[in-house]
Amino acid sequence: MKLTKDELDKVFAAADRLYSSVEVEQAINQMAAKITDSLSKKNPVVICLMTGALVPLGILLPKLQFPLEVDYVHATRYLGNTTGKGIKWIKYPETDLQGRSVLLVDDILDEGYTLKAVFEECKKRLAREVLTCVLIDKQLNRPRAFEKADITGLRIPDRYVFGYGMDYKGYLRNSPGIFAVKEP
């Protein structure tokens, strides 16, 4: 869905900033410390869940000062929309995961369907252990398909958010902070 610059400017101007860039960067530093504690001696495969985790992982990787491999998957429910459907696999992991420690990095844990599908795919490929890491954990008042990530950066209320990799209808992933779309 193509949106005009004016439409996007209005969404951004009306949005509520939940976290500044400084707060997000501090959370990513804390995530890096936890990942280092858990995986620094295990030669892990770090898997980026595209497209949302591209920004958080890009910031996170240089902070992980130990041997690791990087791969990515692209499994989506949204396809540029604000609501999801069934999981559509665009790209599976290429790295051999058998017997390996795997870290899945995602932008947000919302309903958990995508993270669950990727987690199960890694287990199916005989990963020794699969840890999950999300920049944002959306606090829902209902059950999720994947309840809790192993490592979480920040928590947000049940609102539609964008920035730091998360998008608004395919746009605003590059916003300098975490923003919630203005509620009607």
Image (tube, grey):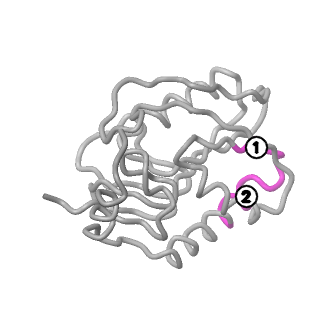
- Confirm whether the magenta stretch covers residue 45: yes
Rendered residue at 71%/44% (across/down): 46
**27 sits to left or right of 18:** right
Label 2 Cα neighbours within 10 Å, binned few <14 / some 14-19 / many ≥20: some
Rendered residue at 61%/50% (across/down): 54
Q: Quadrant of residue 58?
A: bottom right
Nearer-the-camera pick, 5 or 41:
5
Residue 138 coordinates in the image, percent (x, y) = 36, 54
Q: Which residues are magenta?
A: 33-46
Q: Quadrant of the C terminus?
A: bottom left
Residue at the left extreme, as displayed: 184
Q: Quadrant of residue 74?
A: top right
CB under 8 Å between discs 1 and 2: yes
Residue 13 coordinates in the image, percent (x, y) = 30, 70
- Residue 3 is labelled as none
Instruction: Name above or below for residue 131 compared with residue 84.
Output: below
Q: Secondary structure at mark 2?
A: helix
The residue beneath circle 1 is 70
**162 sits to left or right of 115:** left
Rendered residue at 45%/64% (across/down): 154
- Give the total of numbered labels: 2
- Residue 61 is labelled as 2
Q: State how far apart marks 1 and 2 are (Cα).
A: 9 Å
